[in-house]
Image (cartoon, helix red, strand yellow):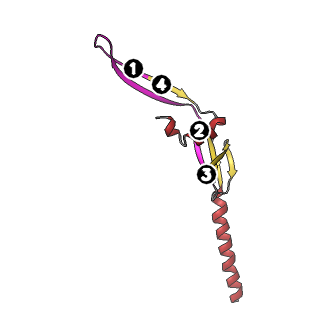
Amino acid sequence: MKKLGAIGVVMLIIVGTLFTLIVPSFFTVRTGEVAAIRTFGVVNEALQPGLYFRFWPISDRIYYDVTIRQIQFTFTAYSIDAQNVQGSVTIQYQLDASDIITVAEQFGTLGMLEQ
């Protein structure tokens, strides 16, 4: 009876370890996002929306929003005859999914691009 209990504990440890390694390796990329996959620190793949499996101890993912985004700048200036002029500029942009690997390698996050 004790032998069966020891085997059960060992099996429980094995199943728990596999569960801990396998379940977090499944992930989804939502619509409007692209995921850049880094394996051992090197960006090597861009994934479109869907369900994926990548072994999490050796790879991580960076999500990028590829929907149309906008940045708005406001400014104040003075004309040649000292009149106050106020204006604003809105820039709309969208990341191309095929360029995500380059963006991930050179900039890391979108925050660097928006500054």
Instruction: Name the spot of residue 75 as percent of width and height, x first.
Output: 37, 23
Left or right: where does residue 75 sit relative to residue 9? left
| Nearer the observer, 80 or 47 | 80
SS for dot 3: loop
| Nearer the observer, 108 or 84 | 108
Magenta stretch, main secondary structure, is: strand
Query: Mark 3 and mark 4: span between their CA atoms?
Result: 35 Å
In the image, residue 97 above or below residue 26: above
Instruction: Name the spot of residue 71 as percent of width and height, x first.
Output: 48, 30
Q: Callout 3 environment at 10 Å: few (<14), some (14 to 19), or many (20+)?
A: few
Q: Tell which circle, 2 or 4, labels the residue nearer the N-terminal end.
A: 4
Task: Give the extent of the magenta segment.
Answer: 59-88
Residue at figure coordinates x 53%, y 27% from the top left: 92
In the image, residue 21 above or below residue 68: below
Left or right: where does residue 66 sit relative to residue 91? right
Location of mark 4 (residue) = 90
Residue 41 marker: 3
SS for dot 1: strand
Residue at figure coordinates x 29%, y 10% from the top left: 81
Location of mark 1 (residue) = 87
